[in-house]
Image (tube, rainbow, N blue to C red):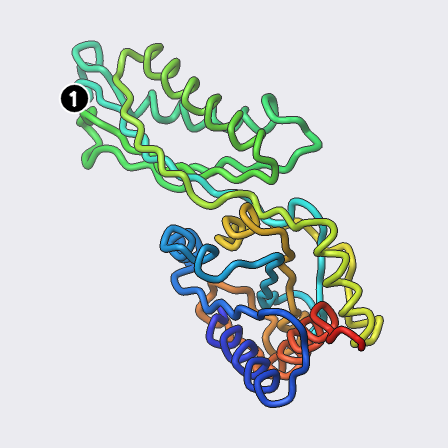
Amino acid sequence: CGHDGHTAMLLAAAQHLARHGRFDGTLNLIFQPAEEGGGGALKMMEDGLFERFPCDAIFAMHNMPGHPQGQLVFRSGPTMASSDYATVTLHGVGGHGGMPHRATDPLVAAASLVMALQTIVSRNVDPMQPAVVTVGALHAGDANNVIPASARLEISLRALDPQVRRDMERRIRDLIRLQAESFLVRAEIDWRPGYAVLVNDPEQTAQALSVARKHFPATQVVAHGPMLAGSEDFAFMLERVPGCYLFIGNGADGEPGACMVHNPAYDFNDQNIAPGAAYWIALVQDLLSPTQP
């Protein structure tokens, strides 16, 4: 979703700062691999990123279709959702479709579980807190006259508050256990923690926003952007170092670059390379401005 463009922006800024930049302090430019599911941020941290390259503040930028090209979008506090995944396998006793009393049907149990899981957001989560539970796949059986021996569900959940994230996991585990018991099947859970909630530091976000307002037209700066249910592994870095994750518009409706990320028709808007690099240059020169004699 445009990581080649993000890299080009940072490389352009690096070239300019190396040739013309005047600033006090140490600037670390992080080119992180494997953001899309690989958790590259966490891997770099486990490899000693911040021990080798200490940072007092950290910033990142991602293109965002739906906003006008070049528009800089900020948000303080929780900004992007956590993501966790679970595979649930319900084990029953297979049998003939005409003799259900001699089987233990995991498919009926799975169908009931799908509906029960939808009550978590509506009945267990504070209605003022965004959260999503999705059952994206249900696999069971191959024939219309056979009760399968097992059923498998693929579940994802997202939250914008760390406590809600923990509460949802606890409630999902309880529902799976209780639903399995009520249908006399056995549940097996493969829980896979994903990315943390991305929380922008208020002070660093205010600084990043002030730089944008100083160097870009007012129409090109959004101070209070929306929260997003997508996930981003820069969240792990923000748990260690205060900072801000901002967006640059890739194109609104009718503009080039408006197609959403993770779509085959998506295309990074190359017109963003110049303003993206310009923002990084301005951020460095403002935050690390040379001390006056």
Judge left or right: residue 143 versus residue 30. Answer: left
Name the residue at 43% across, 17% down.
Answer: 174
* Position of residue 200 measured from the top left corner of the image (x, y, whole percent): 65, 50
Vertical placement of 252 versus 237: above or below?
below
* Amino acid bearing label 1: Gly
* Position of residue 95 measured from the top left corner of the image (x, y, whole percent): 15, 20
Q: What residue is disc 1 on?
A: 94
* Position of residue 169 measured from the top left corner of the image (x, y, whole percent): 46, 28
The quarter of the picture where the C terminus appears is bottom right
Name the residue at 61% across, 57% down.
Answer: 56
Of the pair 27 and 149, the residue shown nearer to us: 27
Q: Residue furthest bottom?
A: 19
Q: Quadrant of residue 87?
A: top left
Judge left or right: residue 35 versus residue 257. Answer: left
How packed mark 1 is, by other alpha carbons closer than 10 Å (few <14, some 14-19, many 20 or more), is some
Name the residue at 28% across, 11% down.
Answer: 184
Q: Quadrant of residue 281?
A: bottom right
Name the residue at 48% across, 56% down.
Answer: 50
Q: Which secondary structure lies at badge 1?
A: loop
Callout count: 1
Query: Can the viewer see residue 283 in this picture?
Result: yes
* Position of residue 69 measured from the top left corner of the image (x, y, whole percent): 68, 75
Judge left or right: residue 92 versus residue 12. Answer: left
Of the pair 38 and 229, the residue shown nearer to us: 38
Vertical placement of 165 versus 266: above or below?
above
Q: Residue furthest front?
A: 293
